[in-house]
Structures are given as structure tokens and as C-alpha cells.
Image (cartoon, helix red, strand yellow):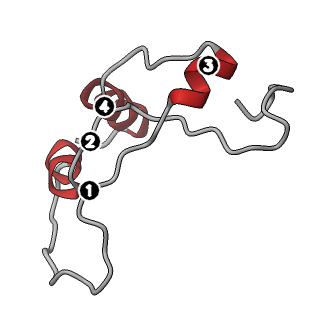
Amino acid sequence: AWESSVGDGMSINIGYGKQSSVNEIADLIGGDRKNIPERKGEMKNIQADITRAKKLLNWSPKITLQAGLKELKQAWKVE
């Protein structure tokens, strides 16, 4: 996306397009984790809006978050 000439400087989100909690991502990554109290003003739900990426770049996710994290862990040799 950063190499494209479309968008005239506007931000373009690249993401999975579905909501995932921090706990879900932590479970997928694995390892030790520590839960901390919620911080004031912290967003409970967030999701990348990939509408611009689809429209301007003709882009859509090709793999799931789960598959992407698994591939990343293999590349980093983390188990």
C-alpha cells in the first residue's frame, strides 16, 4: 500500500477486517501473559476499516489472522 500512488496521502488501513480481542490474539501468540486492569479511556473494541484498501488498491485479506500469526511465529521460530 505504501508503494501505491493512489489515495493522495490519505491513510489506508490494512487488516483482517474482523474484530479480535487482545486476549484472542494473546492466545494465538502463546507464551506468558499478564492481565492488567482496564485503563481509563481504553477502547473495548476496535477493527481496521479496510474499505479504502478494497476500493483504491483492489486489496483484500488472503489469509486469516490465525494463519498469519502462525506463519509469523514459524518465520521467527517461536513456539
Mark earlier in primary sequence (2, 4): 2
Q: Are marks 1 and 2 in contact (CB under 8 Å)?
A: yes
Q: Decide: is 62 above or below 76.
A: above
Residue 60 x %, y %: 49, 17
Give the distance between the C-alpha atoms of the residues marked 1 and 2, in whole angstroms: 7 Å
Q: Are marks 2 and 4 in contact (CB under 8 Å)?
A: no
Identify the image quadrant of residue 37. Answer: bottom left
Q: Identify the secondary structure beneath mark 1.
A: loop
Q: Which residue bears the numbered disc 1?
A: 45
Viewer-nearest of labels 1 and 4?
1
Q: Decide: is 62 above or below 41.
A: above
Q: Identify the secondary structure beneath mark 2.
A: loop
The amino acid sitting under disc 3 is: Lys
The amino acid sitting under disc 4 is: Leu
Q: Which residue bears the numbered disc 2?
A: 19
Label 4: how many Cα within 10 Å (few below 14, some 14–19, many 20+): some
Q: Identify the secondary structure beneath mark 4.
A: helix
The amino acid sitting under disc 2 is: Gln
Q: Is residue 45 left or right of residue 17?
A: left
Q: Residue at x 32, y 81 (%)?
A: 41
Mark earlier in primary sequence (3, 4): 3
Q: Which label sits on residue 55?
A: 3
Residue 2 x %, y %: 75, 35
Q: How many numbered discs, if any?
A: 4
Q: Which residue bears the numbered disc 4?
A: 65
Residue 44 x %, y %: 23, 64
The amino acid sitting under disc 1 is: Asn
Q: Identify the secondary structure beneath mark 3.
A: helix
Label 2: how many Cα within 10 Å (few below 14, some 14–19, many 20+): few
